[in-house]
Amino acid sequence: MSSTDPQGLQAFPDELSSRESWLEPFGWYQKMRDEAPVRYDASRGSWDVFRYDDVKRILDDDETFSADPERANDYIEPETEGEGLILQTMLFEDPPRHDVLRSVVEEPFRSRAIRQLEPRIRELTANLLDDALSNSDGSSNSSGPDKEMDVVGDIAYPLPVMVIAELLGVPVEKRDQFKTWSDTLVEAASDDVDTKAYMDDQRQVQMEMAWYFLELIEERRENPRDDLVSRIATAELDDGSQLAREEVLGTCILLLVAGNITTTNLITNAVRCFDETDSFETVRGDDRALATTIEEVLRYRSPVQAMTRVAKSDVTVHDATIEEGDRIVVWLGSGNRDERKFDDAETFLADRAPNQHLGFGHGTHYCLGAPLARLEAKVVLSELLDRAMDLRVTETELSPTRSSFIYGVESLPVAFETR
């Protein structure tokens, strides 16, 4: 599972090169926090940062640490036009341009606006669970008094794709295509995959998404609708200008990918945590308890385990001198298990409060879709628990997602009895 990122750099540390180590990286995190809280990995050409305070400091300091990969000493320019379009997003922009891009879509993702989506999200969730329980989609099986379903395939993957597709104004029936694109863009190449073939796949998907959205953007500029693509394509900035084509494209792609990948893994990781700690009954029928427990999932098994920054100037972090242009990986998943910040950090505590985790990042680039992800997770889990009794994970050999920063499993079979 050792891999490379889109710039051709090794993305996985050697210590996380096996399936088992990426499924449970937390022992290694603890060792690094104690023995090498800031270390340079020559094989990947990057620094790794593991402690909570250091991770938070880097994410909070836009003046010293850039989100733009082009600032890195080892950044490789795309070889063909369009190959780098995916980078024209707020995710890889620093202020003030980041703030301009974010302002275009910030209002629809505020908590107040997101709460209005709950009835529709609940309706979609109920329909998906009805399909799963009735075996109508062929992905669920019944055996005796028990029902079986795959949390990922039956609910955690389709629901977020459907929601973000409706918000963007793209056809929900293309959700399998959107899922394939999203998975390809965040996956890491494994040892048994040819690097050139992997890079070709990445480029092909970027171009497919680019052409799809470029046609849609032009259509929405001519005939705007009440959707996010129209909002982004026609937005007028404070100076009277509009976003550049690459920025409109990048924002649409970012919302589609981030709007489903993170929530899929939050829901799935929640079921894993609840199963491991027998927490299903603790949250059943109690929305407040469920909301608190979801925050603990975000800390304990963060859907995003790492983020990358680039030093804008020479800087000292925890006695290590990081030079201008050096790449830095901040391990959110490690910071969230830091004993210096959280009491009993290696224990899943459903009622942990306060809980100042870094599951959605921190600072300027704090996850725009956090309110939506929280709501979708709450609705899915509450609807599932309303219908299912004696819920339990039935697979012991789980396969982690193929990504060097997204954390989840490819499939999570569960068995239960219907209420």
Image (tube, grey):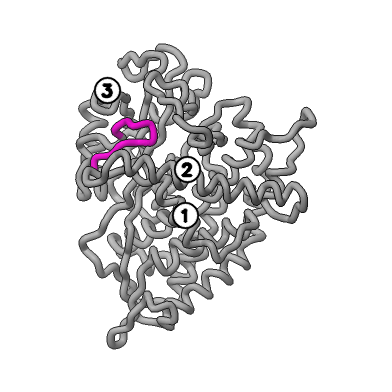
**Residue bearing mark 1:** 263
Residue 155 or 231: which is nearer the viewer? Answer: 231
Residue type at mark 1: give it: Thr
Placement of the N terminus among the 4 image quadrants:
top left
User: What is the secondary structure assignment of the residue under circle 2?
Assistant: loop
Residue type at mark 3: give it: Tyr
Residue 403 x %, y %: 34, 45
Measure the C-alpha gap from mark 1 to mark 3: 32 Å
Residue type at mark 2: give it: Phe
Query: Going from the N terminus, do you reach mark 3 or mark 2 first?
Result: 3
316 relative position to 237: left or right? left
**Residue at left 33%, top 80%?**
141
**Residue bearing mark 3:** 40
Instruction: Look at the image and give the residue range highlighted in magenta.
Output: 1-10
Vertical position of residue 248 compared to residue 241: above or below = below
Residue 70 or 286: which is nearer the viewer? Answer: 70
